[in-house]
Image: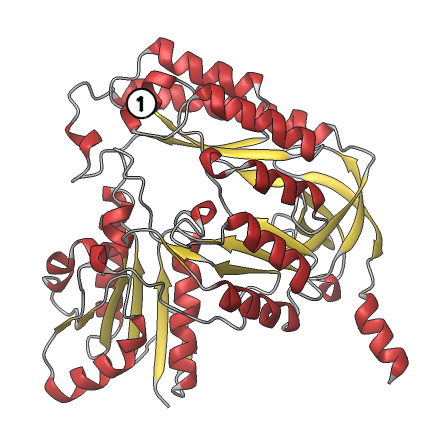
Amino acid sequence: MSTVAFHTLGCKVNHYETEAIWQLFKQAGYERKDFETHADVYVINTCTVTNTGDKKSRQVIRRAIRQNPDAVICVTGCYAQTSPAEVMAIPGVDIVIGTQDRAKILEYIEQFKQERQPINGVRNIMKTRVYEEMDVPAFTDRTRASLKIQEGCNNFCTFCIIPWARGLMRSRDPKEVIRQAQQLVDAGYKEIVLTGIHTGGYGEDMKDYNFAALLRDMDEQVVGLKRLRISSIEASQITDEVIEVLKRSDKIVRHLHIPLQSGSNSVLKRMRRKYTTQFFAERLVQLREALPGLAVTSDIIVGFPGETEEEFMETYEFIRDHQFSELHVFPYSKRTGTPAARMLDQVDEEVKNERVHRLIALSDQLAKEYASQFEGQVLEVIPEEPYKEEPDSGLYVGYTDNYLKVKFPATEEMVGQLVKVKITKAGYPYNEGEFVRVVSDQVKEKMKLSS
């Protein structure tokens, strides 16, 4: 039996796609091995969001080659798409596929075995206009399933290489999205996370269909789905129609990740982001009216070229005043090939790091304040795994719908189930809770009774 091992770098979309590529190997009778062991084929799914992503990708490729010099080494993903020649130049790399044509991987492997010549299967992604279907009926992770609904991005922010790695916006056929969502729920998943490169842009390339319509259809048509989470949505994509759907749905969770990147209009302009802080603030007010208790998390880039102390303070105050519940803070890092990397007034590394620390401290404080509103409340949690820091404590960790991380007494059987938990002590990164009861799945109960 042939064996295959995978290593995924980067984002949720890459993790989704690795699972989809694994399905192809599984159907062809391969056995999946751990990446640190001896396998016949290694698939490295690469990232290129930063220069460090490239470097890490190269390190992992070399690690696979050392593991088994006779193995077939396949490299895919964003770094492979933007720099195929660089990847092909690594001695030992056999097959390079970018962010499309992944279905050809097995025939490339057969071709390589016969001809023993390296294969470069990367095509110009900017010419691709059709969403590539990749099915994932189940995941290695048991508790929440990702569902990829779109690909590519048309924004071309000045710091970002991703349109060149992923191409332009293209949406998945809504029927396929619904079909796969149902398949995942039938496989036992209670929570589905909608993901993509520019998730909320879904439908921008379609005539009479959009993201709000997809949310509405999923809400109404996927039988047995308990939670629907949006992995990330741009402020400009939160239309009145989307807000209306969020307000009406009892499945879409009270948590949105809305990347801000900067709370200064002058910086946003240099980044070529398509909104102002005024617009962003107005959307937040409307969202919170529609969804009381909403958690809003965000991404911030600190030390973007030319960022002054005043501009940084505008960001700091905007975040403080608008009560975000948690931030992902990144120091700006130059991405070769982007306009921002060529800007002249690059910010000093020490200044960047000092600003990053100030924002992380603010984020921790805001996270604690947000969590404290829920002390004493009973919330629904899906237990994911035992609490690693005290493995013998009988505590498990899971997330509430509004993305609070809770540790509480549970059992292995409860993993992946919906459980009512009372928050006894709010905190960050963990809240403490006590188990109340498992929310029984009435559909299954009814089926048991009728059989």
Image coords of residue 93 (percent x, y): 17, 69
Residue at the disc numbered 1 = 269
Specify whether 82 is left or right of 223.
Answer: left
The quadrant of the image that shows the C terminus is bottom right
From the viewer's perspective, is residue 356 above or below residue 151?
A: above
Tally of marks: 1
The quadrant of the image that shows the N terminus is bottom left
Specify whether 133 is left or right of 176.
Answer: left
Q: Residue drawn 71% across and 45% down?
A: 248
Mark 1 belongs to which amino acid? Lys
Specify whether 259 is left or right of 428.
Answer: left
Q: Residue drawn 38% across and 15% down?
A: 312
In depth, the one of 7 and 78 nearer the eye is: 78
The image quarter in which residue 275 lies: top left
Image coords of residue 237 (percent x, y): 47, 39
Residue 403 shows up from this direction: no
Image coords of residue 311 (percent x, y): 36, 13
In depth, the one of 247 and 409 nearer the eye is: 247
Q: Residue drawn 74% across and 66% down?
A: 413
Under circle 1, the secondary element is helix
Specify whether 321 is left or right of 222.
Answer: left
In depth, the one of 117 and 160 nearer the eye is: 160
Residue 224 shows up from this direction: yes
From the viewer's perspective, is residue 167 above or below residue 106?
A: above
Image coords of residue 178 (percent x, y): 56, 65
Q: Return the residue found at the far top.
A: 310
Q: Return the residue found at the far right.
A: 449
Characterize the local packing of mark 1: few (<14), some (14-19) or many (20 or more) Cα atoms within 10 angstroms.
Answer: some
